[in-house]
Image (tube, rainbow, N blue to C red):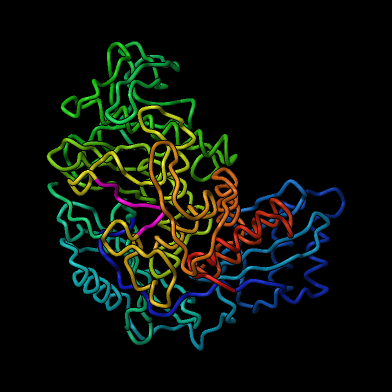
Amino acid sequence: MSSLSPTGGRARRLALTSGAAVLTGALLAAGAATAAAGAAPEHHDATSVAATAQALGLGAKEELVVKDVIKDADGTVHTRYERTYAGLPVLGGDLIVHRAADGTVKDVTKAVKTAIKVASLTPKQTPTAATSAAVKAAKAAQTSGAATGDAPRKVIWAADGKPVLAYETVVTGTQHDGVTPSKLRVITDANTGKKLYEKQLISDIGGGITAKGGSGAAAPGGSQAAAVGTGVSQYSGTVSLNTTKASTGYSLVDSVRGGSSTVDLKHKTSGKGTVFTDADNKWGTGSPANNQTAAVDAAYGAAQTWDFYKNVLHRNGIKNDGRAPVSRVHYGNAYVNAFWDDSSFTITYGDGDGNKKPLTQLDVAGHEFSHGVTSATANLEYSGESGGLNEATSDIFGTAVEWNANNAQDKGDYLLGEKIDIFGNGKPLRYQDKPSKDGRGSADYWSADVGNLDVHYSSGVANHFFYLLSEGSGAKDINGVHYDSPTADGSTVTGIGRDKAVQVWYKALTTYFTSTTDYHGAREGTLKAAADLYGANSAEVKAVDAAWAGVNVKA
């Protein structure tokens, strides 16, 4: 999950390195062999993967592991690899090989281009010392109840550009607000003991928000069958809900969408919760006083997000494997946040200030769901500029989910969380047309120090880019909301429409972004994505370039 406060942004930007790699004869041969004899070019057996590693010039101790394969309509195949060194995971060693339909390599995108090599695989620090250092870092981040479960994992840390033998330790506890769970991933140098990096694995909707207060159980027994019920939500009006019928009633389990379930935490901050059940398949009243109402919004949000990814982006769930996460509502007491936990595959919602404004609005659901998609694809590191891109990706797709739902009670807009009143003043959490309107430090434009901001604020650059690419610059009213989007250089940007902008961002995320992509790397990736989708000299490519220039990201 994302933390509520900065985890210490790195001053140095992590670079995405891409471009025309030296395409050796061996690499071309490896690609051709994969596509030969009628074999699908996206098939990767151990021999072809090893041949790719050798052709890329990787060392004898390095091996590639296929994480994801995407095939374009023209036959181009993008294969995302993770890397190991002497059997150890290389963090920041991910790369993408782009092959044409005939198997020839068009390009290679690497998270870092430094050769992976360390002098010794024998650490000078003990795992116990690494644990102590990680717990100390967690306490410095105001984590209460800091503790470790699993022993530290030995890894190669390469994301900063210089490979180092390191320990990876996950420290659990509770974040500084006293309610939000903490899973802090800490990387320490295995020789010096120095902390190299830390990342909060809990991704939340806010940034600097002070929260207040504090796989579900089985469905009803008996034979089960798909059913359709009606729910009265707090934010989206009366909605249709896919449920499951059993001999003892109905449950909020959507078998149509990967088994998506909605559970009641009953104001606890731990445990799996209990699946919501109902006798007549009529859920909620529209009032937060009814405990089913938040469940209706959460279930509706999960369904609409699933449908957006499946119907618009042709993705079958978060991991593209047809499996849905669990939505958990009524977390803590008057908890003003929502978060995604990749390890438990859950989305969790608090009930808001006074337990009257659950954070279950449609775009919030889309935002949290999308953290899982980012983790399953580019896996953007959650700090520095890559962390800002991670947050912006969730904002972009959360916004897109709301537009795609076309719900009259929660109309599409370029605002995030406009109905949950998270600050108690009736204002949205974030604005995409001009992020600085939040008054909390969100960046409208890129600068050399933007990576030092909390990721929820550095996300402003990409959010602004997305708005400019969708709608263009200047003042206008859209769907009843007034926007006025400036540019860094005073230029005029003409948008290509939201639908195309969404496709560009998704393609860049899934086929060009890596774990260390920064804003200039995002510019490069989206330009390539637009060229793939619409042609190298298309108006869409020119618009992408102009929109990035509008937020001060230039070649």
Task: Please give left or right for residue 153 compared with residue 537 in the image.
Answer: left
Residue 334, given in percent of the width and then of the height, sits at 14, 42
- Please, is residue 372 above or below residue 83 in the view? above
- Please, is residue 440 above or below residue 197 in the view? above
What is the tally of numbered marks visible in this picture? 0
The magenta stretch spans residue 266: no
Q: Toward which corner of the image does residue 444 lie, by quadrant?
A: bottom left
For the N terminus, give its image quadrant.
bottom left
Q: Which residues are magenta?
A: 427-435
Q: Is residue 151 visible?
A: no
Residue 107, given in percent of the width and then of the height, sits at 71, 67
Residue 140, given in percent of the width and then of the height, sits at 20, 72
For the C terminus, give its image quadrant.
bottom right
> What residue sits 32% from the left and 75% below the top?
127
Q: Is residue 451 visible?
A: yes
- Please, is residue 173 above or below residue 108 in the view? above
Task: Please give left or right for residue 432 compared with residue 15 in the image.
Answer: left
Q: Main secondary structure of the magenta part?
A: loop
179 or 222: nearer the eye? 179
36 or 125: nearer the eye? 36
